[in-house]
Image (cartoon, rainbow, N blue to C red):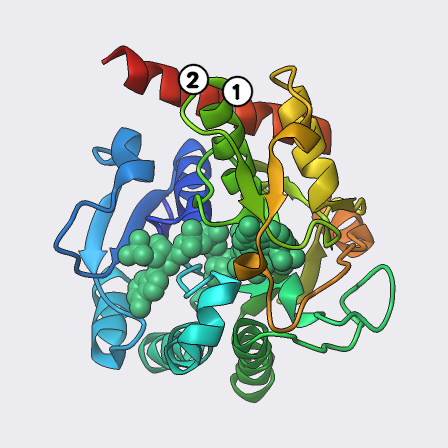
Amino acid sequence: MPAPTALITGITGQDGSYLAEYLLSLGYRVVGMTRRSSTDVHERLEHLLEKIELVSGDLLDQNSMTTLIADIRPREVYNLAAQSFVPTSWTQPVLTGEFTGLGVTRMLEAIRHVDSKIRLYQASSSEMFGKAVEVPQSETTPFYPRSPYGVAKVYGHWITVNYRESYDMFACSGILFNHESPRRGKEFVTRKISHGVARIKLGLAKTLPLGNLDAKRDWGFAGDYVKAMWAMLQQDSPDDYVVATGHTHSVRDFARLAFAAVDLDWQDYVTQDPQFMRPAEVDLLIGDPSKAKRVLHWEPETSFEQLVQMMVEADVQRLRVLQAR
Ligand code: NAP
Ligand code: G4F
């Protein structure tokens, strides 16, 4: 049997790099869609560049996506590409709607026109629960998004469900709660903290300005979560799944542990800066991953404490190497 082919949009992002590694380990041919850039955006993929294929396409361009699907004929498509930073969705709400919302329809249309049997994973988000109406949040919890990003993801979720029901497509929506790693973008709070802690530890900074310390998130490790994406596309029928740890922690908890990992007290360094507060906040997210456990046999393998330790160690190590140059 020839190796199955997977197309990943958003392969240059955090999840794209972990998913590519995982699919390669399973024997897949991995093709990644990237948009044109005048600079090198392959930092997370350097170690994989000889094992994967990169092709050019953009979520804004229907023709590029349809042509890619027709040329590559993947068995599975993982649609991870999006404008994924919540604060940017307030300053660029229309663009966020185009990428994160309508981009999903473009991918569904591309698949429908070329071969509606191609399996699709859509990267949905716990941000859709927003001002959560129940605790914990499961596949049946109603959505109440609190940002243009969350609203766009709700659209992406429902259009995926709609195409599944309208055209009998194998389209799954993975409702993933926050997942982090040493490859997380530095603007997201966990990586901002781990990177800030490393800079303070090595004498490169004196303070770490943050926004809302009370917000609570269900944080897991991205390397664990990509396994659930793959498992969804191996089932007999398509469905939607919450992927989470079932535990929640505040931003303050994350900061406390991260500073403690290098023997510092967070209270000596963290300041609060109103510029990092949001017009509307998501106060508490905690997922109920029991369906993923029951059907996909998926469970998180990395604890919150291990995640924080891993991220701080990686940033300290990275900065030490840079300092030694
Ligand atoms: P990320 O690191 O921000 O990566 C986003 C990816 O999308 C990048 O590869 C980016 O390419 C690509 N992209 C953006 N706009 C594009 C466009 N117009 N055309 C083609 N590609 C485009 O995000 P992530 O953390 O890996 O998350 C992956 C997906 O899961 C996203 O859809 C995100 O919204 C969703 N999600 C993430 C989490 C989480 O906690 N990480 C939780 C739930 C859902 P460039 O490198 O060119 O910018
Ligand atoms: O790390 P964050 O920016 O992630 P957020 O907004 O939860 O979104 C992430 O997770 C979603 C899943 O629920 C994804 F769909 C989305 O793509 C993204 O990956 O912020 C987490 C919390 C917020 O409550 C924020 O107000 O941390 C709080 N926070 C406090 N100080 C901060 C800061 N966030 C950032 N980015 N920077 C701060 O200085």
- Residue 205, position in %: x, y? 44, 29
Residue farthest along the right direction in this orientation: 135
Q: How far apart are marks 2 and 1 (CA)?
A: 6 Å
Residue 199, visible in the rendered structure: yes
What's the amino acid at mark 1?
A: Glu
Numbered badge on residue 293: none
Q: In which quarter of the image is the C terminus?
A: top left
Residue farthest along the bottom direction in this orientation: 166
Residue 228, visible in the rendered structure: no
Q: How crowded is mark 2: few (under 14 residues within 10 Å), some or many (20 or more)?
A: few
Q: Is residue 254 above or below residue 248?
A: above
Regarding ligand 2, which quadrant of the image does it lie in?
bottom right
User: Is label 2 in a helix, a strand or a loop?
Assistant: helix
- Residue 203, position in %: x, y? 44, 19
User: Disc 2, disc 1: CB below 8 Å?
Assistant: yes
Q: In this view, does 71 lie above or below 38?
A: below
What's the amino acid at mark 2?
A: Gln
The residue labelled by disc 1 is: 313
Q: Is residue 215 left or right of residue 279?
A: right
Give 24 or 175, whichever is nearer the viewer.
175
Residue depicted at 85% across the width and 59% down the height:
136
Q: How many marks?
A: 2
Q: Does the residue labelled 2 lie within 8 Å of ligand 1?
A: no
Classify residue 309 by image quadrant: top right
